[in-house]
Image (spheres, helix red, strand yellow):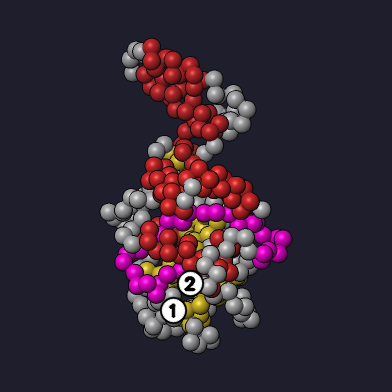
Amino acid sequence: MEFLRTDAIFMEILQERKTITGFLDAVFGFLRRNTDFYHVKKHPNENVGFAKGVREEILFGAMQRYDPDCKLNNLAADSNENDGLYAPPAIEEVEIETEEVDMEQKAVTNLSETTKSCEIITPKNNTRKVDFAANDYKNGACFAEYCWSQTLTEVELHVKLPADLQTAKSICIDIKPDRISVHSRKDPKNTVIHGQISTRYKHNDAVWTITEGKLTISMDKGKEMWWERFFTSEDPIDTKKIDCERYIDDLPEDSQAAIQKLRVQQMEQDIVNNGQEINDSEKNTMERLRMAWDAEGSPFKGQPFDPSVVKFS
């Protein structure tokens, strides 16, 4: 099980640091040095860091998730709920955009079973006017009351909420391996959205938040692939038009080496075409990177040069 491996790693750190305080100091020091956890977004469209207040929300939710006196412990990563058909849960860091929120909007989920048919149900009235941004449905689709976006490994669902159902305390969010349902806590018949998911995903790791009248559910895909639809009731999108660019830092090390080879090869060609001379440092760099061209595991081995599939950060 996944937690056995992580427990062994954390136990080694705990034994070295001696105390819980020392252990947490090591954890947050790691986050400071190696992640964007402490970066505060200056603009909503910024792709790095978190909006004000989100860090605290994530930490509070993580503590509540494993608190035996809290209902959120039903979502623990070592949950026994697995029908064998869906990919097992994995630890995930989810970037959530929000502003200052009420403490009642902490991630509280309800896993109650629902007997409603798997069809999309959208609110008929009392819906707050919420506009979806282009990034909300990038590589996905946009509808009147909801939209979804995707990368090769993740997918996000964005749902407009009625004005009287815009707090975590007022709604129930039911996330299952094959469906997602959102309805009023006071009146279960008042359904915001309900639908059957088209493709496998890691439902135990789904994370949601409410901000500005919109519910956002983020999840990991079961495997790396492009989805044609989110709910089975949707018409398929044209996956040939998907923006499939990937940053070089997101690729395996052997793939990065091969891509760097292509990058330097192009630079060398540009220098030759422009009549410039190559200095010794550039020559050494190019020589080292050339060695990675035919390395095992290179995704471009034996293929023509096409740098357009990679975006350099």
Can I make out residue 125 in this image?
A: yes
- Residue 280 point in image, percent of width and height: 38, 12
- Residue 147 point in image, percent of width and height: 46, 66
- SS at mark 2 in the image: loop
- Work out how far the residue at label 1 is from the one at label 2, CA to CA, in angstroms: 8 Å
Q: Quadrant of residue 110?
A: bottom right
Q: Which residue is mark 2?
A: 108
Q: Residue at x 52, y 39 (%)?
A: 251
Q: Residue at x 53, y 33 (%)?
A: 253
Instruction: Indicate which disc, 1 or 2, sits on the residue closer to the N terminus.
Output: 2
Q: Is residue 35 left or right of residue 200?
A: left
In the displayed image of the protein, which residue is found farthest to the front? 18
Q: Of residues 68 and 146, which is closer to you in this image? A: 68
Tell me the kind of residue under disc 1. Lys
Q: In the displayed structure, would residue 294 be above or below residue 189?
A: above
Which range of residues does the magenta coloring cover?
80-108
Quadrant including the C terminus: top left
Q: Is residue 298 left or right of residue 62?
A: right
Q: Quadrant of residue 53?
A: bottom left
Q: In the displayed structure, would residue 8 be above or below residue 109?
A: above
Q: Which residue is mark 1?
A: 169
Could you tell me if the residues under marks 1 and 2 are in contact, i.e. CB atoms within 8 Å? yes
- Residue 199 point in image, percent of width and height: 62, 61
